[in-house]
Amino acid sequence: MTSNIEACREALAHLDLDCNVNTVQQKSRDFYWYSPILKEQLGHITADFVVAPRNEAEVVEILATCYKHNVPVTTRGAGTGNYGQAMPLFGGVVLHMKHLGNVVAINDDHFIAQGGAVIEHIETSLRAVGKEIRLFPSTMSSATIGGFIAGGSSGVGAIRWGGLRNPANIRRLRLVTMEETPRVLDLVGEDISKAAHAYGVNGVIVEVEMPADPSTDWVDVMIGVDSFDNSCRLALQIGEDATIDKRMLSNFESAIPMAYFLRHRRFFVEGEALLAVTVSRATVERLVEVVEAYEGARIALRYDQLEEGLKLPAAFELAWNHTTLRALRVDPTITYLQMLVPRPVMFEKQAEVKARFGDELLLHYEFTRFDGVVAPVALPIVRHTTNERLEEIIQILEQELGLPVFNPHRVTLEEGGMKKTNPVQLEFKKQADPKGLLNPGKMIAWDNPDWVPVAGKTYLFAE
Ligand code: FAD
């Protein structure tokens, strides 16, 4: 199948096109450089040109034209994805969602927004009418809602509502397919999983409908705790305490806040683990009561009692993958991992991790709700030495310690996820993208449905 880029560019010349080599390269990148492995593999990647549709009809036109000329299309929100998700591995077109940024409607219990709407804009629009978004990534100031659904997984709010996989958290996705005559589909119920967390390989999300909840006045509170284990115990207690309304619950080994949270560290004490809680103003005093009764814990900082004139980044901008960002700003050799630490064995497993890796791996958990149960998701910081060592660490975690790693050093859906192909998304792709032109190279199942993972080997970049 040969692409005819020139004919495609000419046919789309009346739209908002960017053909400047430098800006096209910029728009072909995401936060892949968080990974030293992806940094080596993807640095040269660039699209042929960028096109930014102004409405749904233009999305349809772009996809039909690219289909006709066999040109790959990679959709881009804000490019804050971490795994090269938004990078056009096989060149072609980057479809930039920047003009599709409107909040379309706010109703009693939900909102409708275009796929390129920046999440902070959605939250501000909701707050203006006494509502709030349920779940957002810590990149909410720039990330788009379509990019969050297609590329993200969880975030602030997950301690109340679970992650994006919770069916209650997405009500409808409006999707344009990539066929000779593209279809515009409204996916609801179980069908949402065909396109959610699919890296845009199954269509372009042009509109989303998601729940909106009554707004709460939130306050960030930082708690110093004498050990990481104790900060975990306190997090579980707060997580399960129905008298404390919280939006975020994150904890960090002591070395992280002292070394990397530069604007906050004067509030911390050397050797103390940090527990960051976003709590409702109505229940903040109840939180304080619980902390004061907990041996070894103290309130280090309350955002509702900041000294006058002091402005600090929101707690969520220390948490989720912002922890890695803050660490990288201090030490560019840092990288990170994402893994599940099953709650029933979490204390035993974290002791094994520390015994095995010491300070090479610093623990950081985000507490979320899985099927109603509070449990940690780990985003540890890794002090990186070589890529071989990084692969070895992942193998030890998975194979010797039994901890599932969602590998952020891989560009494919499968390797970064459950290490197996997703038959529902594969079947849908056959209908929605029969030529395999949407974000090619990201779904192993499309090229090789019988793939099985080989430890330490990357699918696309195997030597
Ligand atoms: P992009 O990076 O532009 O795209 C992500 C993927 O979605 C790509 O595969 C792209 O092709 C596809 N895509 C984008 N828009 C569409 C569309 N309209 N239709 C179809 N496909 C589309 N992730 C979390 O889940 N939770 C976090 O808390 C979080 N924190 C982060 C913190 C930092 C500092 C960084 C760098 C990343 C973080 N991420 C987090 C990852 C990322 O920010 C989120 O996934 C974010 O929501 C992506 O949005 P985006 O608009 O930047 O998407």
Image (cartoon, grey):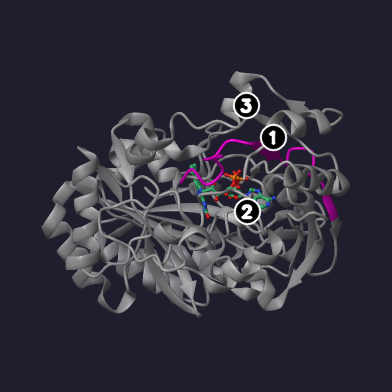
* Ligand 1 under 8 Å from disc 2 Cβ: yes
Residue farthest to the left?
A: 355
Question: Marks 3 and 1: in contact by CB < 8 Å?
Answer: no
Q: Secondary structure at mark 2?
A: loop
Q: With respect to residue 145, does 65 lie above or below?
A: above
Q: CA distance from mark 2 to mark 1?
A: 22 Å
Q: Amino acid at mark 1?
A: Asn
- Image spot of residue 176 (x, y percent): 77, 56
Q: Residue at x 74, y 38 (%)?
A: 98
In magenta, the rendered stretch is 83-104
Q: CA distance from mark 1 to mark 3?
A: 18 Å
What's the mark number on residue 24?
Answer: 3
Q: Amino acid at mark 2?
A: Gly
The answer, for residue 266, to whether it is visible in the render is no
* Residue where numbered disc 1 is placed: 4
Q: Main secondary structure of the magenta part?
A: loop
Asked which quadrant contains residue 201, the reply is bottom right
Q: With respect to residue 57, does 237 lie above or below?
A: below
Foreground tag (1 vs 3)? 1
Q: CA distance from mark 3 to mark 2?
A: 19 Å
- Image spot of residue 163 (x, y percent): 54, 66
Q: Residue at x 43, y 70 (%)?
A: 238
Q: Residue at x 58, y 73 (%)?
A: 424
Residue 398: within the magenta? no
What's the mark number on residue 124?
Answer: none
